[in-house]
Amino acid sequence: MGRALAHLGIKHIAAYSPEARGRSERAFRTIQGRLPKDFALAEIVDDIVAANRFLREVFAPMYNRLFAVKPELEESAFVPAGDLAWRDVLCVQEERVVAPDNTVSWNGRRLQIPSHPSRPHFVRVTVRVHEYPDGALAIFHGPRCLVRWTPPEAAELPVAKPSRRGAS
């Protein structure tokens, strides 16, 4: 999460104790204490559609009227991210050092890096392996994508054979 926030230019301010999270903790306590009682008064027991309508039309406006704080700036705090490559922000990324056979190890598989116009091989170079939520894989060297595997291709990559090193 920290990597994705940094990539988006968002500064993460962590709060590791309930005291540091006091405002949100008090808000949760208020909501957890009030909401069940308000549902009961509105005679909403097992109807999720009615509960969602009540939240949207009654509870949220009332809660905001009582507890909302006017923002310092009226404009939206949301900033468009532009042409950011979202898939490459919101994926698992790990660095690997390329082996002498121009491969990297990933989840029990050896991923072969094909020849690339930027250099003849990547032996002993640190690269980044990206694993996407849909199962696709990619290997990057800096901003360059060296190779991509779509989900069906990634699933069919062969599992590496166990090393014979140390065998007696």
Image (cartoon, helix red, strand yellow):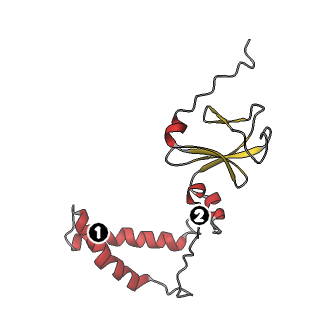
**Left or right: where does residue 142 sit relative to residue 18?**
right
Number of residues whose C-alpha sits closer than 10 Å to that of mark 2, classed few (under 14), some (14–19) or many (20 or more): few
Number of other residues with Cα within 10 Å of mark 1, as a class: few under 14, some 14 to 19, many 20 or more:
few
Q: Residue drawn at (43%, 82%), measured in percent from left and top?
A: 67
Q: Secondary structure at mark 1?
A: helix
Q: Nearer the viewer, residue 109 or 10?
A: 109
Residue 108 image offset from top left, x and y in percent: 61, 31
Distance from Cα at disc 1 to Cα at disc 2: 31 Å
Q: Amino acid at mark 1?
A: Asn
Q: Nearer the viewer, residue 12 or 164?
A: 164
Reply above or below: 72 against 90: below
Q: Residue at x 62, y 45 (%)?
A: 138
Badge number at residue 52: 1
Outermost residue toward the left in this view = 43
Q: Is residue 151 left or right of residue 116?
A: left
Which quadrant of the figure contains the N terminus?
bottom right
Position of residue 36 in the picture relative to residue 88 (left or right): left
Give SS at disc 2: loop
Q: Which residue is mark 2?
A: 17
Amino acid carrying mark 2 in the image: Ser
Mark closest to the chain's N terminus, 1 or 2: 2
Q: Quadrant of the C terminus?
A: top right
- Nearer the observer: mark 1 or 2; the answer is 1
